[in-house]
């Protein structure tokens, strides 16, 4: 009974150690993965596209 309690404590400690080191690594990986995707979407668009909807808006916004 003593050995299983010791093993259980050790595994809990190991889990907490892993959790504290894995969380910042996961956040960094997410942040690094998101930056190139945003840059790609920004490079593709050049503002509003000229469509019938935008022309109707511009016509209604004139004073």
Image: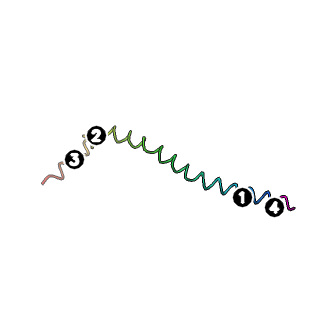
Q: Judge the density around disc 2: few (<14), some (14-19), many (≥20) Cα neighbours within 10 Å.
A: few
The N terminus sits in image quarter? bottom right
Question: Disc 3 to disc 4, how far (Cα)?
Answer: 73 Å
Give the numbered dot on residue 56: 3
Tag 4's secondary structure? helix
Pointer 1 residue:
12
- Whether residue 4 is in magenta: the answer is yes
Question: Of circles 2 and 3, which is in front?
Answer: 2
Label 4 to label 2, Cα distance in Å?
63 Å
* Mark 4 in CB contact with mark 1 (< 8 angstroms): no
Mark 1 closeness class: few <14, some 14–19, many ≥20 residues within 10 Å = few
N-terminal label among 2 and 1: 1
Q: Nearer the viewer, residue 49 or 51?
A: 49
Residue at x-position 51% and y-position 48%? 28
Which residue is tagged 2?
46
Residue in view at x 76 percent, y 60 percent: 9
Query: Which residue lies under the disc numbered 4?
Result: 5
User: Which is closer to the viewer, label 2 or label 1?
Assistant: 1
Range drawn in magenta: 1-5
């Amino acid at each position: 009974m003593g050995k299983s309690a010791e093993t259980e404590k050790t595994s809990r400690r190991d889990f907490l150690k892993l959790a504290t080191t894995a969380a910042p690594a996961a956040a960094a990986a997410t942040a690094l993965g998101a930056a190139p995707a945003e840059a790609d979407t920004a490079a593709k668009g050049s503002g509003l596209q000229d469509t019938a909807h935008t022309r109707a808006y511009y016509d209604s916004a004139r004073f």
